[in-house]
Amino acid sequence: NEEDKKATGGLTSLKKGKYLDGATDGMADKVPAMIDNSDPAALSDGEYVITADVVGHLGNGNSDAGAKVLDDFMGDVRMARTNTRKQAPEINPQKFLPKV
């Protein structure tokens, strides 16, 4: 529940593999978290958190280089799916549902 998330830094919904599982949409930024116990971060259900050691491994020991590998990867996937390297804008899905 939401109180459990807040009490533990917002990461109680992490499953093995660091996948955030929950009911909010993927752009809600409603899962509170802290970076280095000092900087607040807002995560969304459906996001996947990659640990610092793996980011560093992707850069052969350099986290900045590893982050670039991941940024390039995300851009490539977005380009393949949406023909742009940018994240799609948030929408109001209610506007697209038929009125009942």
Image (cartoon, rainbow, N blue to C red):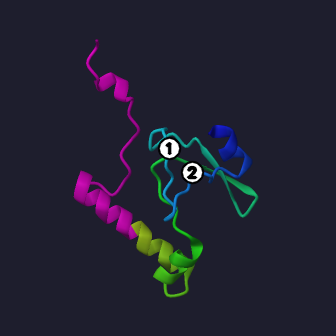
Does the segment drawn in magenta span residue 50? no
Q: Dots 2 and 1: beta carbons under 8 Å?
A: yes
The furthest residue to the right: 38
Measuring from the top left, give residue 77's x and y in whole percent: 30, 61
Neighbour tally class for label 2: few under 14, some 14-19, many 20 plus, Cα within 10 Å:
some
Q: Is residue 35 left or right of residue 23?
A: right
Type of residue at label 1? Gly
Query: What amino acid type should be assigned to the residue bearing mark 2?
Result: Ser
Q: Earlier in the sequence, mark 2 or mark 1?
A: 2
Q: According to the image, label 1 marks what residue?
A: 22
Residue 75 inside the magenta-drawn segment: yes
Give the magenta part as a residue range.
72-100
Q: Pointer 1: residues within 10 angstroms few (<14), some, or many (20+)?
A: some
Say left or right for 14 vs 35.
Answer: left
- Locate residue 54, reporting x and y percent: 52, 77
Residue drawn at x 49%, y 87% as measured from the top left: 60
Quarter occupied by the C terminus = top left
Residue 33, x across and y down, in percent:
65, 52
- Element carrying mark 1: loop
The outermost residue toward the top is 100
Which residue, given by chain and number where applicable, does mark 2 sit on?
13
Residue 92, placed above or below residue 24: above
